[in-house]
Amino acid sequence: MRQLRLPAALAVALILAGCGLTDPYTSQHLATTGTSTSTSTASTTATATNADPAPERGGTIPQGAQAAQNNSAAGSGSPTPQAALERYANLDSNWTAKSVAGVQDQLAAISLGQARAQALQAAASYGRDSTLQASQVANTGAVVAIAPGQGPETGWWVIVTHETTTGQGEYAGLPPTDHVTNAQVEHTRNGFVVSAWSPQS
């Protein structure tokens, strides 16, 4: 649950200023180093190991898995990038503890790449989250603004939603909050679909 408050005026100012979007999914993976000792020579040699399975080494995944992750189903696309982002944002911000896993499955069905993988992981995780169920958490929201990134952030979009989270315990009495999300879309044969979804607040 996101609890960081961002006034609507500030969110709109961020959009108009280009917002300094960054790609949070570019990261470097460090190889771990193990040490082995030979008893006959008493020498120590450092060897690099890679924790990724063989087909995924070097930042790649098997072609079949990549194709499945990047294929969109009929009806998953929207006629414009803004329509795809609004559709995704409305689903993402309206759920209950009982429906959240199903909503994430719906998000996976209308997205590709990182956004799809993230939604599938969330569906599996939220389906086992007893805290959400016990607290009867629910979230309602609406899109406030959608704007394209400019300059070096061309290709990224900024989405601002106004959301209210309710529930029991620590979720009781939370004030309505504005949330900012960075996203990307991809044009497919079925229309535009969300391919990256990165909540910022």
Image (cartoon, rainbow, N blue to C red):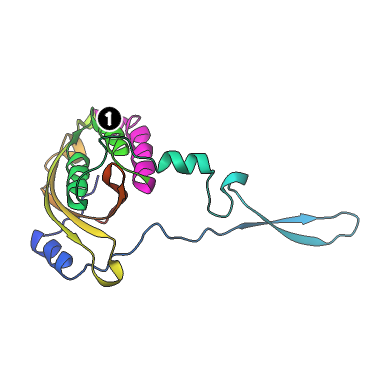
The residue lying toward the viewer, choosing from 84 and 51, is: 84
Residue at the image point whose x is 20% and y is 40% from the top: 170
Residue at the image point whose x is 21% and y is 49% from the top: 85
Location of mark 1 (residue) = 102
User: What span is colored magenta in the figure?
Assistant: 113-133
What quarter of the picture does the C terminus occupy? bottom left
Residue 89 in the image: state x and y as whole percent: 20, 45
Position of residue 151 in the picture relative to residue 68 (left or right)? left
What quarter of the picture does the N terminus occupy? top left
Quarter of the figure with residue 14: bottom left
68 up-or-down from 143: above or below:
above
Q: What amino acid is found at the position of numbered circle 1 in the picture? A: Gly
Residue 139 in the image: state x and y as whole percent: 16, 39
In the image, farthest residue toward the right:
40
The residue lying toward the viewer, choosing from 13 and 56, is: 56
Quarter of the figure with residue 99: top left
23 up-or-down from 187: above or below:
below
Residue 53 appears in the rendering? no
Query: Residue 123 colored magenta?
Result: yes
The residue lying toward the viewer, choosing from 151 and 145, is: 151
The residue lying toward the viewer, choosing from 65 and 56, is: 65
Position of residue 13 in the picture relative to residue 151 (left or right)? left
Residue 192 in the image: state x and y as whole percent: 26, 47
Quarter of the figure with residue 126: top left
